[in-house]
Amino acid sequence: MTINIHQIKHFIGHFILAKRNGHGIHSPFAYQLCEEVFYNHNQFYDFKSLNSIRNGLLANQTKLSIEDFGAGSKTFKTNTRTIKDIASKGISSRKQSELLYKLLNFLKCKNVIELGTALGLNTLYLALANKKAQVISIEGSSELYNFAQQLSKKNNTGNIHFTNNVFDKALPETLTSLNELDFLYVDGNHTYEATLNYFHQALKKKHNNSVFIFDDIYWSKGMTKAWQEIKKHPSVRLSIDSFYFGMVFFKEELKEKVDLKLFLHY
Ligand SMILES: C[S@@+](CC[C@H](N)C(=O)[O-])C[C@H]1O[C@@H](n2cnc3c(N)ncnc32)[C@H](O)[C@@H]1O
């Protein structure tokens, strides 16, 4: 990932202000999340095999041709990329994917949407975190979509549905097909307008125990502005900013709104 001035500025602020290891957190639910998810260093059974799939991708020299669907890439300058390059620069890191696994596993989320499949590695983490979940992963690039489908078949997950379309078309259709949404992970088209648009659409299917996660909230000024507005939405009762991820929870029993910054090692 390429780092820009906006990210450096916010990272310094985050480094100074963020809470560490659950210290000074008064909300019992947020504290429980720290214990069970964010600072839970247990190695889950699936991590070993997922890590070896990642290592395989990191050594794969196959080239894919990829269209640009949204905010573009600050890392890749051409449309032809090796799987190896995508795996090292264009997807969630091992620790980020493990965090999402632990969160989904702890909350026992069943209806899951991932916006931005890429190679489908993170999708595997989400699918394995709860075998009873149905993970719908949306990707605009047909070459990535095909690759992710093959990867999932090889690893026999059985609970992933891949959709090959742009988010603007696929998200409304997907949301209509669900009664409720437990887990939304937005990892593509990082613009202010698109991020808020996906948030507002998904809100219609949220419930008391849903969680929405936005990747790269300090990627650009627009993303940070979108994150500030998402946090402020009246239905958000708890927001957690871990620098790379912005996570929001909607539990109505949290009478006092809580905004937290957590320092996590990615
Ligand atoms: C950062 S990658 C996703 C990484 C993946 N979640 C992971 O961590 O393994 C973002 C993906 O979103 C796709 N994408 C971006 N904007 C899109 C759009 N508007 N519609 C469909 N796909 C889009 C890109 O093609 C890219 O593969």
Image: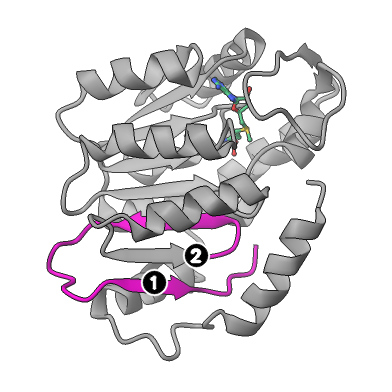
The answer to whether 242 is drawn above or below residue 85 in the figure is below
Q: Residue at x 68, y 39 (%)?
A: 54
CA gap, disc 2 and disc 1:
8 Å
Residue 46 is at least partly visible in this image: no
Dominant secondary-structure state across the stretch colored magenta? loop
Please state the quadrant of the image where ligand 1 appears: top right
Residue 196 point in image, percent of width and height: 43, 39
Q: Are marks 2 and 1 in contact (CB under 8 Å)?
A: yes
SS label for mark 1: strand
Is residue 122 left or right of 256 when viewed as pictured?
right
Q: Is 256 in the magenta?
A: yes
The answer to whether 248 is drawn above or below residue 50 in the figure is below
Is residue 107 left or right of 219 when viewed as pictured?
left
Q: Quadrant of residue 248?
A: bottom left
Tag 1: Cα neighbours inside 10 Å, few (<14), some, or many (≥20)? some
**Which residue corresponds to mark 1?**
259
Is residue 199 left or right of 204 when viewed as pictured?
right
**Which residue corresponds to mark 2?**
241
Q: Is 8 in the magenta?
A: no
The answer to whether 261 is drawn above or below residue 17 in the figure is above
Q: Residue at x 70, y 68 (%)?
A: 11
SS label for mark 2: strand
Residue 36 point in image, percent of width and height: 37, 70
Residue 213 point in image, percent of width and height: 43, 49
Q: Residue at x 54, y 52 (%)?
A: 225
Most extreme residue toward the bottom is 24
Write down the region rendered in magenta.
241-266
